[in-house]
Image (cartoon, grey):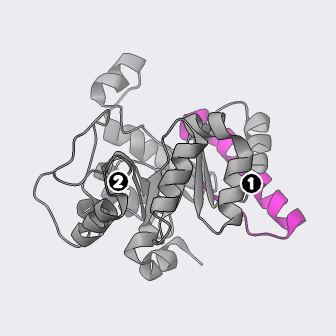
């Protein structure tokens, strides 16, 4: 199924990945349990993966949960290719690399996943590339000596990912419309930095509300603390879902 078709058939809950940005398996298990009645998926990043390891990813996937393994691989092409194959063997639904690693690295990773899929007879996970982290802004770009604006950099890296054969990118929803226009409908856009209108920004800088992210063209929303730090996680999730069809004017 294409990204465009998937987007049209998704219910709102399936658009959401809850970020398990916690330091222990016990805390992650608690979040998963609290949200077990919903159709959300879960994102596992470096912190939890380092603490709980690949076995936890395998168990979540075996239990039927969609898992985005957010390890942002960035190394020489062969090393990244081998890493994404190992990640795919956990059963993860989606994995990612850093687009700053370049087109050769991304293309080699995509090829390795296709080969692994053919050999194992299973559908490969979605492979997407991080563009510019949502904790970064123009000051960060200038500090690193990256020429052009944040938007120009995101656009360039997104198109590199598409040309390398990846399924989509991770980008701020503030750039989603631009990416959708350039990359077309058959390209996944995964947006972190999602905050309800009344939420704190925490360490994020380029943030967007859920409703506006969807309207801008985002496919998947990664949401963490607005749900996981809530006293009643299911209630917080329900509140976000209720507001996903409502535009805001705070952008």
Front residue (pair 191, 55): 55
User: Is residue 215 in view?
Assistant: no
**Principal secondary structure, stretch drawn in magenta:** helix
Label 1 to label 2, Cα distance in Å? Answer: 26 Å
Give percent across and percent down for residue 161. Answer: 56, 49
Q: Which residue is mark 2?
A: 227
Which dot marks residue 131? Answer: none
Give percent across and percent down for residue 123. Answer: 74, 69
Front residue (pair 30, 239): 30
Give percent across and percent down for residue 47. Answer: 56, 34
Judge from the rendering whether residue 113 lies leftward or rightward of residue 239; answer left or right.
right
Q: Residue at 28%, 41% (x, y): give it.
A: 206
* Part of the protein shown in magenta: 99-127
Q: Quadrant of residue 182?
A: bottom left
Q: Residue at 74%, 54% (x, y): give it.
A: 90
Q: Earlier in the sequence, mark 1 or mark 2?
A: 1
- Tell me if label 1 and label 2 are in contact, CB under 8 Å: no
Q: Residues within 10 Å of mark 2 (few under 14, many from 20)?
A: many
Judge from the rendering whether residue 115 lies leftward or rightward of residue 29; answer left or right.
right
Q: Relative to 49, does residue 60 appear above or below in the rendering?
A: below
Residue ranking furthest to the right: 119
Q: Which quadrant of the rendered structure holds the N terminus?
A: bottom right
Instruction: Determine whether the residue tagged by mark 1 lies in a helix, strand or loop.
Output: loop
Q: Is residue 40 magenta?
A: no
Instruction: Determine whether the residue tagged by mark 2 lies in a helix, strand or loop.
Output: helix
Q: Which residue is mark 1?
A: 90
Q: Residue at 40%, 46% (x, y): give it.
A: 155
Give percent across and percent down for residue 234. Answer: 36, 64
Q: Residue at 22%, 41% (x, y): give it.
A: 200
């Amino acid at each position: 199924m294409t990204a465009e078709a998937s987007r049209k058939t998704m219910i709102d809950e399936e658009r959401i990945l809850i970020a398990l940005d916690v330091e222990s398996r016990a805390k992650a298990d608690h979040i998963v349990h609290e949200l077990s009645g919903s159709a959300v998926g879960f994102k596992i990043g470096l912190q939890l993966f380092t603490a709980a390891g690949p076995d936890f990813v395998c168990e979540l996937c075996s239990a039927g949960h969609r898992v985005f393994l957010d390890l942002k691989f960035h190394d020489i092409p062969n090393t990244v290719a081998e890493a994404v194959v190992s990640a795919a063997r956990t059963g993860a639904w989606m994995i990612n690399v850093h687009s700053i690693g370049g087109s050769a690295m991304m293309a080699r990773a995509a090829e390795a996943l296709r080969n692994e899929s053919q050999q194992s007879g299973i559908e490969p996970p979605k492979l997407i590339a991080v563009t510019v982290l949502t904790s970064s802004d123009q000051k960060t770009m200038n500090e690193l000596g990256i020429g052009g604006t944040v938007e120009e950099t995101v656009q360039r890296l997104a198109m590199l990912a598409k040309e390398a054969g990846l399924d989509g990118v991770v980008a701020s929803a503030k750039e989603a419309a631009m990416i959708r226009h350039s990359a077309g409908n058959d390209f996944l856009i995964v947006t972190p930095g999602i905050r309800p209108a009344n939420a704190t920004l925490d360490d994020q800088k380029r943030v967007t509300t859920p409703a506006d992210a969807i309207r801008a063209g985002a496919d998947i929303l990664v949401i963490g603390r607005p749900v996981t730090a809530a006293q009643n996680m299911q209630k917080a999730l329900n509140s976000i879902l209720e507001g996903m069809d409502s535009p805001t004017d705070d952008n």
